[in-house]
Amino acid sequence: MRILSRLFSSATKSVLFPGLIFLLFSINVDAQRLMIGAAKRVITPDPLLAVSGGVGTPKSVHEKKGDLFVRAMVLVKGSEKIAIVNIDNLGWPAALGDRSRALIKGIASENILIGATHTHSAPDAYAFPNEQGGHGADLNYLDKCVVQVADAVNEALEKIAPANLKIAVAKAEGKIAYNYYAPKLYDPRCGVIQALDVSGKPIVTLVNYAIHPEVLGSDRGILSGDLVAPLYDRIEQKTGGMALFMNGAQGGMVTADNRLDGGKEARNWEECQRIGNLLGDEALRIIEEAPIQNNPDIYCANKTVTFPIESAMLKYILQNSPLGIGEGDSDSISTTLNLLNIGTAQVLTIPGEALPNIGYYLKRKMPTEHAFLFGLTNDAFGYILTKEDFNSFDTYQYISRTSLGESTGELLISGLLEMVGQNPKPTSR
């Protein structure tokens, strides 16, 4: 009996031991492999809600063009886990984002970047207070969106699979954007990060471009993702994978180039389709010949920065919104900045609408040809301009009034460049 037992044990070891080694090897390989997942949720309100293009009473709507979405991309390698999220809205305050972060399991809250497309045709997400102490936001709708953001990230994390990347940055050609204040003062560069599965099929294509999606605007009676909606459709039809848009340094006023002869503008859905399709085609052209980056590294850092609140209007909004956006009677407000390295790309986040000169300067100081800026991410504190530009001439009166203050730009730049200097550089080619 002992002899049979010894023979069985020996046979079992000969079969199981190599299998155990293979299993442990596979687990270790997967732990060092870049894994990416993507997911989205529809957040179109039913029935339709009034839409907001900024401070003031939301405008009623009578139809929709396309749906509103939350879209999430999750990257995992080893112990590093990062989520990049965008929502079809004018902006998404940290007060809402933090509620979603609390519902997301498995990713550190400071590694969850939540941005907004900046469409001017979506429901009010700030609950902008009026002089009577009321507001026009639908808080139940915002509660649902908070859950949908978390659900999209959690699903994307569940769907992660081995992936490689293609990354490219180049000028997007054609009539897409311009600066309303100074037509040529905008950044025409489009950054693209495309995740591919092991067979080479796109999982998700991220497009980073600075533009105001306000072809329709809030006064057309239409709820819509504006030009971003057809951009998503175009990319998804051509690649089979999900599309994700992250805005850039589009402040003052980098807007959609829907100009017509005679000083008029095309403000219709057909123009949204023209611009969205063109930007989608250009993004795919830019990324098409980019070399595949096999199993690249990822990295995420964060920093808290505090801005003084000098604008009386913004101080009133921050302190009186029922969402708890501000910090009581404080004369300052804090937010989170992120630095990401994704293969050869480096990403910096901006909690508002930085003017193009700030965007150009930051990109010039970043140690890579693949520099990305995610505007309106983690917060949306209005326009961000340099102290030299702040309230200096008539053209910038409006954007100065809707900025936290003249020191915001300087504090943002110093905080971001400090992170650039203190953290590892992205992978070189």
Image (cartoon, rainbow, N blue to C red):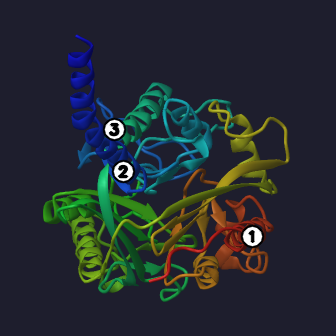
In the rendered view, would you say 143 is above or below 70?
above
Q: In the image, which is nearer the foreground, mark 1 or mark 2?
A: 2
Q: Which of pointers 3 and 2 lies earlier in the amino acid sequence?
A: 2
Disc 2 residue crowd, few under 14, some 14–19, many 20+, Cα 10 Å: some
**Nearer to us in this view, 23 or 120:** 23
Question: In the picture, residue 18 is in which quadrant?
Answer: top left
| Residue 256 visible within the image | yes
Residue 5 left/right relative to 345? left
Q: Amino acid at mark 1?
A: Glu
Q: Amino acid at mark 3?
A: Glu
Q: Residue furthest top?
A: 1
**Relative image position of residue 389 (x, y in whole percent):** 73, 79
Labelled disc at residue 418: 1
Cα–Cα span, label 1 and label 2: 33 Å
Labelled disc at residue 110: none
Query: If the image is split into quadrants, where does the N terminus sit?
Result: top left
Cα–Cα span, label 1 and label 3: 34 Å
Q: In the image, which is nearer the foreground, mark 3 or mark 2?
A: 2
Q: Which residue is mark 2?
A: 30
Labelled disc at residue 158: 3
